Structure formats: C-alpha cells, structure tokens
Image: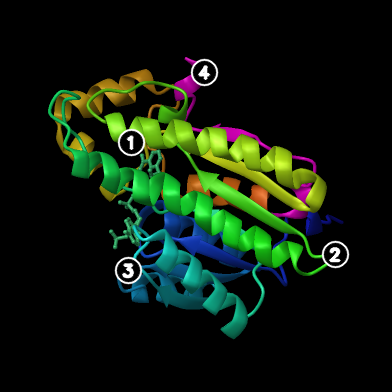
Amino acid sequence: MSDLSAFSLAGKRILVTGANTGIGQGIALSIARAGGAVVGVGRSAMDDTAQKVAAVGGDFEAAYCDLADSGEARAMFNRVWDEVGPIDGLVNNAGIIRRANAVDLTQADWNDVMDVNLNTVFFLSQAFARRVFADPGRRGKIVNIASVLSFQGGIRVASYTASKHGALGITRLLACEWAPKGINVNGIAPGYIETNNTEALRVDSERSAAILARTPAGRWGRPDDIGDAAVFLLAPASNYMHGAVVPVDGGWLAR
Ligand code: NAP
C-alpha cells in the first residue's frame, strides 16, 4: 500500500502567474494532476489552459491583469483572495526576456524586464504574506521561477540575468524572514525549456545544437518537467525547505 499524501495538493488553491502558455501552463497542469485548484493569472486568454486542466479533472479560475504593473498585480491578488477564496500557494512564473548586446540595451528593455521578473515577484509575494500573516495559524508556500541565469552570466540578456539573480536573492531573503512565520519560499531554476521564451534559440540551428550538446540529458526540457518539481515545492513533502532554488535543467549547471 502506498501513501502519497505528502505529495498531494488536495484542498489547496494555488495562484500561478503566466498560466496561459509555456512553463506556467505546465505548472497549472501538474498542480491539477496533484489535486490542487488553480487560479491562473495573466493578460492573455487562458482558455487553452482551462480546457487542459478540465481534461485532467482539475479546477481552474482565470484572473486577468498586467503583471508589468505591480500595483495592479497586488490589487488583483487581493480581489482573488476576497472573491475566489484564500490562496495556499503562489507561483511567480511570468517572465520576459529581451536580447541585445549590453552596449545597445535600451532603458526600456532594462525596465520592462525588471518590472515583470523582479518588481512584481516581490510585491505579489508581499501581498500574499500580508494575507497569510493576517490569519493566525495559516501557512503558505511561494515558488519563484528563477533560471540557470540566476547562477550564470549568459550573453546578450543583461536585464534578464540581473532580474534572475535578483529573484534568487529575494527568494533567500524572504525565506529567512518568513520561515519562522509559516511561509516556505523556494524557487526553481529551469534550464532550456521548449516554450516561446526559447523560440529564438531553438530556430537558430547552431545555438540549438550547442545547447543540446552541453545539456547532459541531451534534450530540451518540457513545461511538465518544471510543473512536477513545483508540485513538490508546494506540497507538504517540502515543508522543511526554505530558500532553496532547485535546478531543473537536464544537468546544465552540474557540468
Ligand atoms: P513564455 O512561454 O514566454 O511565457 C511567459 C508567461 O509570462 C506568459 O504567460 C506571458 O503572458 C506572461 N507574461 C509576461 N509578461 C506579462 C505581463 N506583463 N502581464 C501578464 N503576463 C505576462 O515563457 P516561459 O518559458 O514559459 O517562461 C516562464 C518563466 O520561466 C519565466 O519567468 C522565464 O524567465 C522562466 N524560464 C524559462 C526558461 C525556458 O527555457 N523557457 C528557462 C529559465 C527560466 P503572454 O502570453 O500574455 O505574453
């Protein structure tokens, strides 16, 4: 007889940003398969994710907002909490990337990436913590989607690398402040995953071959590779984990 309850999200409601596509959609589906209810947040229609979640018997609600505006994101979060119900876990997944040589990167390409990838990650986490702490005895889990570029420099992605190093740092800081107060803050550092984010790399046959040759697993990652790791960080099985940013990268960082 097996007991997988430590890995179950039954009875939990998890808010996932950027759930309409890519890694966010993979996370939403993994949560649904683990028995959790999903609130998908973003600016684009989420019908595809809603249908896929329904197909595995899950519960899905969509909430729309522009995550470049951290004030709008906070207001959305509080509205969801009041109107849909309390949130048990927050997955800060939405993110953007801008590619340019560092000497050419514009102020807009710097600010736009920082707004979505770092500013909103912090202020959504703060909004979540305020609601959790206002309800004595309530606990919570935060999972930040970082990157292998939280640990490496990369090339031609200056604002992205800065934002993802920031995401690593803020994951650790929030873990230190909130572990004693009942919130686990952890992260995942995906390697190279098949999504819109990496389309430019995948259509460039030279870059694509170089990436695959350097990846011990020898394949691109899939959104559900990240989704299943997120389930672990949202479930009771990881209750003693605080401030870890776990690579899920086919071995890229081990090399
Ligand atoms: P993606 O397919 O481009 O998805 C990004 C998601 O973020 C989309 O849902 C997108 O919505 C949403 N988003 C971006 N800006 C937004 C805004 N202003 N308001 C609302 N939603 C917004 O990329 P992905 O690969 O799944 O990326 C997900 C996360 O994983 C990101 O944080 C990324 O940095 C990280 N990551 C990805 C890889 C990889 O290899 N793919 C590797 C390491 C880390 P729209 O569809 O409306 O734009």
Q: Nearer the viewer, mark 2 or mark 4?
A: 2
Count every numbered label the image shows and give the total: 4
Q: Disc 4 marks which residue?
A: 254
Label 3: few (<14), some or many (≥20) within 10 Å?
some
Per the rendered image, the range of residues in magenta is 235-255
Q: Disc 3 marks which residue?
A: 43
Instruction: Give me the C-alpha separation between circle 2 and circle 3.
Output: 33 Å
Q: Disc 1 marks which residue?
A: 160
Of the numbered discs 1 and 4, the one sitting upstream in the chain is 1
Answer with the quarter of the image where residue 12 lies.
bottom right
**CB atoms at circles 2 and 4 under 8 Å apart?**
no
Q: Locate residue 234 relative to residue 158 in the image: left or right.
A: right
Q: Disc 2 marks which residue?
A: 137
Coordinates of residue 57 in the picture (x, y in percent): 56, 76
Residue depicted at 72% across the width and 69% down the height: 10
Q: Is mark 2 within 8 Å of ligand 1?
A: no
Answer with the quarter of the image where residue 198 lies.
top left
Q: Secondary structure at mark 2?
A: loop
**CB atoms at circles 3 and 4 under 8 Å apart?**
no
Instruction: Give me the C-alpha separation between circle 1 and circle 3.
Output: 20 Å
Of the numbered discs 2 and 3, the one sitting upstream in the chain is 3
Answer with the quarter of the image where residue 206 lies.
top left
Of the numbered discs 2 and 4, the one sitting upstream in the chain is 2
Q: Locate residue 83 relative to residue 161 in the image: left or right.
A: right
